Amino acid sequence: MQLEFDRGTVIIRPGASPTSVADLPGIRWDSRVRVWRAPARFQAAIVSELRARGVRFVDRVGRRMDGVSSTWCPAEQLALRDYQRDAVQAWLAAGQRGLIVLPTGAGKTRVAIAAMRALARPTLCLAPTRILVEQWRTTLAGFYGGPVGQLGDGVHDLQAVTVATLASAYQWMGRIGDQFGLLVVDEVHHLGHGLYEEILDMTTAPARLGLTATPPGATGAAALAELVGPVVFSRTVADLAGTALAPFELVPVPVALTAAEAEQYRALRAQFLAAYVPFTIAAPAATWADFVAAAGRSSSGRQALAAWRRARELVTAADGKRQALATLLARHPDARVLVFTADNTSAYRIAREHLIMPITCEIKRRERDDVLAAFRAGTLRHLVSARVLNEGVDVPDADVAIIVGAAAGAREFVQRVGRVLRPRDGKRAVVYELVVEVGSEPARARRRHDAVASPAGPGALP
């Protein structure tokens, strides 16, 4: 029998008896073309099983490129910290598969490069944005002597070490999925929820490394454990603060609603709960997504969702937040300050009111680069952004973060805190979060703070 790569899958050509292949990992009979077929990620497992059974076969999968091992820098040039070295060793010990969780600014890219150097295999690095692809190529050029290929942003240059956006990898993986022995996925938490997961199915790369500062929830973690591997090493901001990261202080700033705002909030909240509470009683195991889907099917449900959104907007734009922000900016006149909001509308409003330069997804790349350069040089002291600076942008050193508005979960909060933790002699970063004292807002803020301030604990790997 013969194994071949075919559009992101592995096929076994005729000559295979059903009894010898039907129970191989991932295999299914494709009656359209009369071959046995499996997602490409099962290729290594299929080969291993066939050999264990003593089945004779020809493996034509994996026409991988050469010329990698001799072009990596000397080991001492990487200068890994102890925890980075431990992360690489944990990944190697786990069979060269798994996720490494490190905070923003803790050197995840350097850890990945050390893993790439250790294996010296043709490697495809995936990143969710073009900005991250640029950063990967620039960083790799400092440690890898060969050409660094790129897929995406109008470039199709396949090399033994190649960086690609998720969108480009999705487009091309059916043709190049057998060319690499190692797959590195940056910001891997973007996967595991259905979008782009097929990329991970369509490559034969047996070695897989996922990088993230914010590990996915239970559903995403289960999917990624199957497609990339489980978490094999984890360190939190609290673990590294004062050593690899700057020491920091989390300061919740309580904000009260005005009497008029409080009255409006109570009315909106009551309208929302009138629909939400009966739904949760009738379906206690339902998720928020289930409620949104159900609410969209009725006029009263849609009105309840609209009330929920207006209540969130009211909290985001509370008048007390404006006053608190002005006070905090005046408290740190000479510091480099990043102001984070929940949306672009809030970012532009703050930019106008406080004469702060905004950075949003609507600002062109060249202007964004100029603004960040001015911030790095100290010409600009304050920046305001919604989500552009959360990840994927090389933010210059900042001392203070002021979180005016945020998502309810901890992931975005952890990312934002990491933006001010780049270490510097004598530096102590400060992170303020403006918390409106109404409803569940204080409890949510405490959970976000706990996610940052708590060490990985005894259950951390390795």
Image (cartoon, helix red, strand yellow):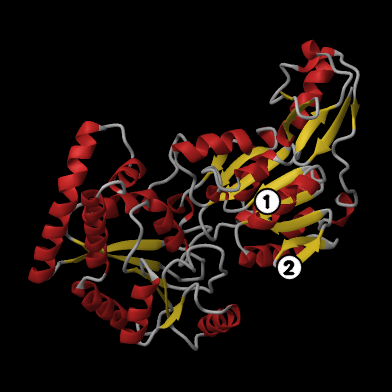
Amino acid type at mark 1: Tyr
Distance between mark 1 and mark 2 Cα atoms: 15 Å
Q: Residue at x 21, y 58 (%)?
A: 307
Residue 324 is left or right of residue 150, and the answer is left
Residue 208 is left or right of residue 249, and the answer is right
The correct choice, above or below, for 283 with respect to 343 in the image is above
Amino acid type at mark 2: Gly
Q: Residue at x 11, y 58 (%)?
A: 266
The correct choice, above or below, for 325 with respect to 247 in the image is below
Answer whether residue 402 is visible to the viewer in this image.
yes
Q: Position of residue 446 (x, y in %)?
A: 27, 52
Between residues 309 and 127, which one lies in front from this camera angle? 309
Among all residues in the image, which is located at the extreme top? Answer: 19
Which of the 4 image quarters holds residue 141? Answer: bottom right
Determine the secondary structure under disc 1.
helix
Can you tell which mark lies on residue 154? 2
Residue identified by numbered label 1: 170
Quick one: quadrant of the C terminus? top right
| Mark 1 or mark 2: whose residue is earlier in sequence | 2
Between residues 84 and 242, which one lies in front from this camera angle? 84
Q: Residue at x 15, y 47 (%)?
A: 274
Which of the 4 image quarters holds residue 60? Answer: top right
Determine the secondary structure under disc 2.
loop
Label 1 CA crowd tier, 10 Å (few <14, some 14–19, many 20+):
some
Q: Position of residue 235 (x, y in %)?
A: 50, 47
Quick one: quadrant of the N terminus? top right
Q: Position of residue 139 (x, y in %)?
A: 70, 64
